[in-house]
Amino acid sequence: MKIIDYLLSGDEVTIYLTKKYLLNQESNHFDHGYIDKYLKLFDEKTNRWGNGVYGPKWISTHYTIQELKYMEISSNHPYYQRGLDTLLTYEWINKGMYSKTRHQDMCIVGMLVSFLSYGKTKNEKLFEMIDYILSHQFSDGGWNCAWDSGKNPKISSIHTTLSVLEGLSEYVKSGYTYKIEEVRGAIPKGVECLLNRDLFKNMKTGEAIHPSVIDIHYPPRWKYDILRVLEYLASIQYPYDQRMEDAIQLLIQKSKNGYMPKGSQIPGLIHFQLEKERISRFNTIRFLKIIKFYKPTLYKEWTS
């Protein structure tokens, strides 16, 4: 079975993603398949999934919203919108002052901006989050969730930086105008921060920052890995940079003629198992999106 045929034999969601991103075809999943399964788990009484807001991981409202957004649920679906209202109520208070001494975690704020922008929210809290992000960009171009922890970090966090970049890019894509030039200016600085690490390396030793960053995961949750960052860069059509090459080659080594395994599953609760096979349609689609953009000759070889 050819790789595209394999992807088209999956769930409605992976069929939709394959047609849209790999075949450049108009498609619609009509919120069926995996999306419908998640929607059936929504609690209309509490406006939550998993009886929680940020936790329990990974069945909470926050992380279910993250999965639904990646699967491209209809952005105006009432359950998605009601889930966003729950997150706005509990995850962003007092303009980000989560307690008397601490601000909201920057990584969470980055994800919130992504979810809210996708949902086309008109709530002013989104613009407060944009102010917060722009006010705390590090001199190296990235962000760090520990910026106000007392640890006084001098360099950014790859996890936080990628979450914020995903959020800012979704904000731009969704057509918002508030401080849009500042947002546009912040994105390339953040990308450069990651490229300066060759996307995964310790800047002092040249080795992987942590084994997990060269592993692959779906869903990635809040964690950084080379598949997630390269998918992001391809999604914003960031031009090829030689500093990406080692990360791309690591992914190619993990694949088998374009097929990508599930990789490690991040421990925690799940609503249901998405994929039972060793090969992951989600990761294969994500990987092929990267190869299609950065290695078109190889993409053609694998998919023709």
Image: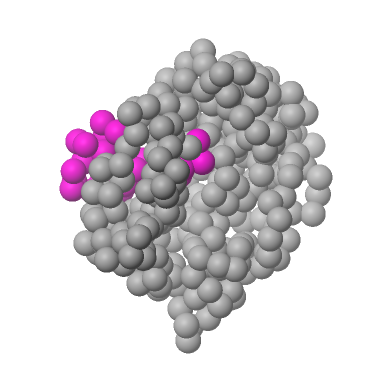
- Corner quadrant of residue 11: bottom right
Residue 69 x %, y %: 48, 55
Give me the residue at 43% from left, 31% from top: 155
Q: For this rendering, which residue is in front, 264 or 205?
A: 205
Total marks placed: 0
Q: Which of 189 and 233 is in front in this view?
A: 189
Residue 58: x percent and y percent? Answer: 61, 62
Q: What residue is shown at x 47% (from left), y 27% (from top)?
A: 194
- For the stretch drawn in magenta, the main secondary structure is helix
Compared with 248, 262 (above or below) is below
Q: Where is residue 179 in the image (x, y as percent from the top left)?
A: 18, 43
* Residue bounds of the magenta highlight: 158-186
Splitting the image into 4 quarters, where does residue 299 fall?
top right
Q: In this view, does 5 lie to the left or right of 20?
A: right
**Residue 177, percent from left and from top:** 19, 46
Foreground residue among 30 and 197: 197
Instruction: Indicate the quadrant containing the N terminus: top left, top right, bottom left or bottom right.
Output: top right
In the current view of this chain or complex, which residue is farthest to the bottom?
Answer: 45
Q: Is residue 97 magenta?
A: no
Q: Residue at x 64, y 26 (%)?
A: 208
260 horizontally vs 79: left or right: right
Q: Could you tell me if residue 271 is visible in this image?
A: yes
Residue 15 seen in render: no
Along the horizontal axis of the image, is 26 left or right of 127? right
Front-most of 50 and 196? 196
